Image: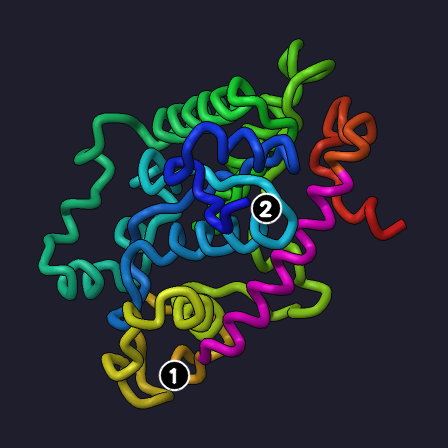
Amino acid sequence: MTDEVRYPMLRPAEIAARRRACPVVYIPIGTLEWHGVHNPVGADTLQAEGLAVLCARKGGGLVFPPLYYGESRSESLMEAGAEDRDKIAEAMGLSPDNFLPERQPFSPTEQVLNYQRLLLHILAEAETLGFEVGVLVAGHYPLIDHARAAVLLFNQRRYSKRHGMLAWAILDYLLIRDRYPAGGDHAAGWETSHLLALHPDRVDLGQLPPKGAKLVGIMGSMPPQEATAAFGRETLEASAEAAVCEVRHRLENKHLYRGHGNSLQEGLWKR
């Protein structure tokens, strides 16, 4: 069996073989957002895809193409809501007015509802393609709430409730916060370490000012100047191991995750 796990890169027979071996699909979701002068703007989605691929290689299954679009561009976005959004826009060569709510065709609430529909549509597509467990892998942290809401709605569909695919949603640092209580940040040491592990050629720590200097659009307890690929690999591996254990338990015990709210349960595999 090929080591390739990305669904669009595989031929039908390869897909069928991997799906028979492990009928799980990982669906990375993220955004395009400022992540400091040193990281690529696709940082969130790149991390989600990297974690999804690692999970599929460790535990089986396939990885859908990552979703960069469709989330709210008015809320929970650095360019739109950060205190230093003017400096972010300046560094991007844009006007901060580009991100005002009136520039969007839909209200913030409509944007959220549109995204919910998109996630439900994607999960239904995965179900039609023969998967028994579908995992939304959130890279942009605010999307975990939207992903969990979509999972609950999807799992309560009449067909899904009894016979269909079981959906679940994950976010890397939430899976391992018992081991890394300070895990998760925005473009600081945690995320930058992930990107150094996954795409070292797209990170340039030399663009950062000396440690201790004021940073634009960066939040977290670990300075980005202290980021390392080794730490990124360590935390991604830990997140993937936890995710694979959860997925395996769901695959083998679907009945425990059916019913109102049950699909969000985590840690049952430890008992």
Residue type at mark 1 is: Gln
Residue 54, image x and y in percent? 54, 55
Q: Which residues are magenta?
A: 228-249
Q: Which mark is residue 208?
A: none
Instruction: Report x, y in % for residue 241.
Output: 67, 58
Quickly name the residue at label 1. Answer: 225
What colouring method underlies this structural image? rainbow
Residue at image position (57%, 22%) is: 130
Helix, strand or loop under label 1: helix
Amino acid identity at mark 2: Ile
Disc 2 or 1, which lies upstream in sequence? 2
For the point 76% across and 24% down, the residue is: 258
Q: Quadrant of the N terminus?
A: top right
Residue that appears at 53% across and 36% down: 147
To which residue does mark 2 refer?
A: 170
Q: From the viewer's perspective, is 128 left or right of 211?
A: right
SS assignment for the magenta stretch, majority: helix
Q: Quadrant of residue 132?
A: top right
> CA–CA distance between discs 2 and 1?
27 Å
Give coordinates of residue 77: x percent, y percent.
34, 49
Residue 198, position as x, y percentages in the image: 42, 65
109 lies above or below 223 = above
Quick one: which residue is furthest to the right in this view?
271
Secondary structure at badge 2 equals strand
Q: Residue at x 45, y 72 (%)?
A: 193
- Residue 69 against residue 131 in the figure, above or below: below
Q: Nearer the viewer, residue 245 or 90?
A: 245
Q: Is residue 106 above or below residue 212?
A: above
In the rendered image, residue 124 lying in the magenta stretch gets the answer no
- Magenta span includes 234: yes
